[in-house]
Image (cartoon, grey):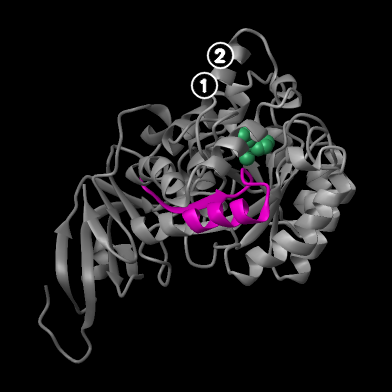
Amino acid sequence: MKSSTANTLAWDRVWLGVNLATMTGGPAYNDGQDPTGSLGELRDAALAIKDGRIAWVGSRQQLASVQWSAANVTLAEGLWITPGLVECHTHLVYGGDRSNEFAARLRGATYEEISRAGGGIVATMRATRTASEDQLFEQSLPRALALAAEGVTTLEIKSGYGLDLDNELKMLRVARRIGEVTGLTVIKTFLGAHALPPEFTGRQEDYVRHVCDDMLPAAATAKLADAVDVFCERIAFTEEQTRRIFERARELGLPARLHADQLSDGNGGEIAADCGALSADHLEYASERSLQRMAERGVVAGLLPGAFYYLRETRLPPIERLRELNVPMAVSTDCNPGTSPIASLLTAMNMACVVFRLTAAETLRGVTVHAARALGLAKDRGALEVGARADLAIWRLRHPEQLCAEVGVHRPVEIVLATKSSRT
Ligand code: NIG
Ligand code: FE
């Protein structure tokens, strides 16, 4: 530590000799030539934080010419710092479980059959409506904590199992409370158009009107929604209904994101692009036109290998075309009780590599810089750069690609949240 003078930079904390995966610069996509370069690696580096923001990033050598002081100095040789991981698509607030459906699917039933027979999303709706707000919080918190223990510092949570005004708002309040209790940044997404609730059977148009006229405005007024999602699918909502809901969201100043082309080609990518959505997620059945429109409009492709895996889907999302078109790819768990009961982003990262054939670098960018973009937060998170939030995951690794290659082995040695710091 240098002596304190008027020109001294005074930091809260500094790490010395650490390796950084900054996720800045370099090619956006791995071209196969340089499998690690696109992580923006900096070895034997230093990183300083102050007032919950990154204050300095550079090589240790550069630091030698800087006058600095810090309340806390960590010699961190052999450690890696990545941005705090960004989990950009979850349904982790829900009541009950659907292990019975898991068993039925193992016996050969399909997700669509189960859903049409009154199971699926509507089964979770019943359990979610029955749970009190406290019970829902207590049932959902462990899933958020499991993600947080793996280095997730920003977490998106959708509603969509209440399917009426009170219960949708209850879910969103629980999501907010999870953020307050854990210190994670929780982005709350209103997904009232997830499935048709039984009381609206045969009256789908009435329900869509209810979503647009009552539920969405109420969620917006209560500041319980940061974005709006729709399940656009033949077992859920049509293209025209999706566009109408997104138009209402736009009027209320809320960005859109979409469950797109998961089970069939519903023109989802194109709808997302037309409506200026932040992301279109799933995309197994997306058409060429949808992909081109997403590329034109900079819509992030949200890849959800957990749902693909659990549904034993055989049609892969068009990864190679997304690469060619330079569409940013985010990776997420889709944590939900039916198609992806996985509260482990590290596991989903491994699946993205093994099942979708993403490279480790693409996957690591998919849970940092591109996931941040999918949430509209790229300005200040997902990368290690001066001014970004000091949300960090610190790991003992030879290289971050181990996070994709090895399952069940790695946990951060420390997680730093801009709001608080905890040693694990
Ligand atoms: O992302 N596709 C729609 N929603 C979820 C599934 C929700 C559920 O089955 O409970 C998904 O896969
Ligand atoms: Fe989902």
Residue range (magenta): 151-175
Instruction: Classify residue 256 by image quadrant.
Output: bottom right
On screen, residue 105 versus residue 353, left or right, reads: right
- Residue at the (38%, 35%) spot, across then down: 403
Please give the residue where the numbered disc 2 appears in the rendered image. 103
Q: Is residue 268 above or below residue 255?
A: above
Residue 337 drawn at (x, y percent): 54, 32
On screen, residue 68 versus residue 322, left or right, reads: left
Q: Is residue 153 magenta?
A: yes
Residue at the far bottom: name it: 6
Q: Nearer the viewer, residue 156 or 94?
A: 94
- Residue at the (79%, 56%) spot, across then down: 210
Query: In the rendered image, which quarter contains the N terminus?
Result: bottom left
Q: Is residue 49 above or below residue 320?
A: below
Residue at the far top: name it: 107
Residue 114 drawn at (x, y percent): 70, 21
